[in-house]
Image (tube, rainbow, N blue to C red):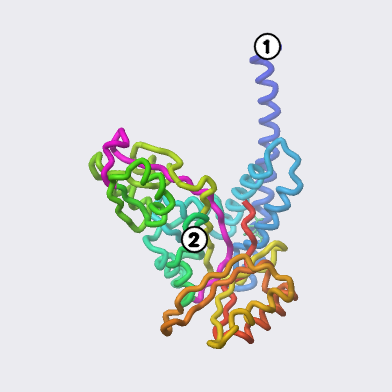
Amino acid sequence: MSEKQALQAVREQIDKVDKQLQSLLNERTALAHQVAEIKQQSGEQADFYRPEREAMILRQVMERNTGPLSDKEMARLFREIMSACLAAEKPLRIAYLGPEGSFTQAAALKHFGGSAELHPVSTIANVFSAVETEYACYGVVPVENSTEGMVNHTLDRFVSSPLKINGEVTLPIHHYLLSNASQLSDVKKVYAHPQALAQCRQWLGDQLAQAELFPLDSNSEAAKRVAEMGEDSAAIAASTAAEIYGLKVLASNIEDEAGNTTRFLVIGNQNVGPSGVDKTALLVSTKNKPGALQNLLKPLADKGISMSRIESRPSRKGIWEYVFFIDIDGHCQDPIVASALKELESESSVFRVLGSYPKAVL
Ligand SMILES: O=C(O)C(=O)C[C@]1(C(=O)O)C=C[C@@H](O)C=C1
């Protein structure tokens, strides 16, 4: 058999498989339509997006996968299939911290897939407002970075917002130095979000010690502005921003920590059901007495509930008063978690479950 014939034979088999896949995808979409009808019967405010179900499906896909496609690739394909099925049920508008090309956009795309309508807004506070006013169904905001710690704007906004946490997304972050210049030595000014400047502090000190650093609202804003500037200016941003704003990549992966990762939260109005592998976020304030924080956390330790994070922030209600953001393993409907939360509530002056949601799968 000639090479041409051999190729033709395999391609015929691929065409056959594609035909089957296509009809199965349409069969799946028709089932999603049925799901939508059932949900619609429950009223106007039906939650079409079900993060717990999506997480369970993705975990099942990875568990039963035998290859040769990798678990992650297979899950990514199913992520897109569910995105298309959800859009067929009800198109969702998702607000994210923009502008276009931001890491938050990449996180929103990773979590909701390509069929969601992604809408950039200019600040973290505006992402919250977009969801609170129901302009968007959900929002995506950064919450912590492995190198630089918490994004305080996001934590602080939870104190006044009624919104809940409906999911999390983690994204490896790589920074690029983008400019109209062709060589590094031309760069005298660097623009970026303060977090990006901090994440590249060492590299900037080594390579651009003389450059002046200018903090801006976002890295993509920096790229957008630098595109209009002369060759003495550069932005730190994602590689996608180079394409969007027509800039040259002067240096790649300039972050100081190789494993630099940012965690984002999906915010919404929903109470998400248990998926089997969940996290719960709490906002609490202690009664102002000695040992209060220790007493507050005791029920978690007593019941063997793992606490993955505790952050304190000024409450903004009184001087030296603090609220604590606590992340624990498990769902607030799990009986053990529920009983620990009841005890914890009795020790707190402020107590709110910000949300129980599935741990990031991808
Ligand atoms: O099971 C549902 O509730 C569905 O709407 C179907 C489906 C899916 O495609 O599997 C789509 C969207 C939801 O977010 C979860 C799952």
Label drawn at residue 104 = none
Residue range (magenta)? 162-189
Position above or below: 189 against 329: above
Tell me the kind of residue under disc 2.
Answer: Gly
Return the x and y of residue 307 as percentages of the image width and height: 64, 68
SS at badge 2: strand
Return the x and y of residue 117 as percentages of the image width and height: 48, 55
- In which quarter of the view is residue 31 placed? bottom right
Mark 2 vs mark 1, foreground winner is 2
Q: Quadrant of ligand 1?
A: bottom right
What's the residue at 74%, 44% (across, down)? 65
In the displayed structure image, the side of residue 328 where residue 255 appears, left or right: left
Residue that extends furthest to the left in the rendered view of this protein: 230
Return the x and y of residue 185 as percentages of the image width and height: 29, 36
What's the residue at 30%, 53% (across, down)? 214
Closest to the observer, 185 or 96: 185
- In which quarter of the view is residue 301 placed? bottom right
In the displayed structure image, the side of residue 175 where residue 331 appears, left or right: right
How far apart are the alpha carbons under marks 2 and 1? 60 Å
What's the residue at 32%, 50% (across, down)? 191
Label drawn at residue 149 = 2
> According to the image, label 1 marks what residue?
2
